Image (tube, helix red, strand yellow):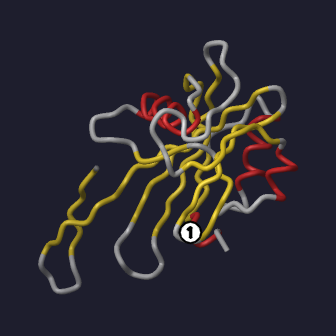
Amino acid sequence: MLRVRLPSEKGASEMSSIRLRVTVVVEHEGKVLLIREQTQRGIFYNLPGGIVEYLEAIPDAAKREVMEETGLLVEMERLIWIDDRIDQEGNGKHTVGVGVLAKLVGEETTPTPGGIVDEEIEWAGWVTLDEWKQLPNDHKTRPDQVKQVLSDPTYQPMYLGNMLSQAE
């Protein structure tokens, strides 16, 4: 976990953490890989991903998270977005998210819910972008963003803003 010293309102320095998260877009036969997971705000269908571990490279984190959550082996192709998740309730939580496009490697294409480690994942599977839009997800802009990434080979990485303020 990256630690950054931030000045407090009282004038003393306090330790606050900025976490780094990777989100992985995997496309196969016109569908994207999603997981269904229980979050603090409910059950959502999201892209695989999670927190990058200390001294772990982003491509390695993407590979690990997809394997842990779906049992599928992937390889990162390119960076596609950066976002922030800054808690608006004042508890100091800040996560920087990195979205990456990855491709399947190996012959296995059938995901296993929970993959090899993650018991919180209730389901994993392939859905079209239109199907995804109909499912509960905690980032309503993501299906449109992924569609743009997959349909435009010249797509350049972009900053998406604070995703927590867009989640409603």
For residue 8, above or below residue 164? below
Q: Residue at left 66%, top 18%?
A: 108
Q: Position of residue 30 (x, y in %)?
A: 84, 31
Left/right placement of residue 75 relative to residue 134 reads left
Toward the viewer: 160 or 57?
57
For residue 46, above or below residue 164? above
* Residue lying at the far right of the rendered structure: 130
Q: Position of residue 65 (x, y in %)?
A: 49, 37
Q: Residue at left 69%, top 60%?
A: 137
Name the residue carrying label 1.
164
Left/right placement of residue 6 relative to residue 19 reads left
Toward the viewer: 45 or 92?
45
- Quarter holding the C terminus is bottom right
Callout 1: helix, strand or loop?
helix
Toward the viewer: 117 or 25?
117
Q: Residue at left 49%, top 47%?
A: 119
**Which quadrant of the view contains residue 105?**
top right
Toward the viewer: 57 or 64?
64
* Residue lying at the far bottom of the rendered structure: 10
Left/right placement of residue 103 relative to residue 18 reads right
Q: Position of residue 145 (x, y in %)?
A: 73, 49
Left/right placement of residue 132 relative to residue 100 reads right
Q: Residue at left 82%, top 26%?
A: 29
Q: State the count of labels.
A: 1
- How busy is the neighbourhood of tag 1: few (under 14 within 10 Å), some, or many (20 plus)? some
For residue 6, above or below residue 88? above
Q: Amino acid at mark 1?
A: Leu
* Residue lying at the far left of the rendered structure: 12
Q: Position of residue 113 (x, y in %)?
A: 61, 40
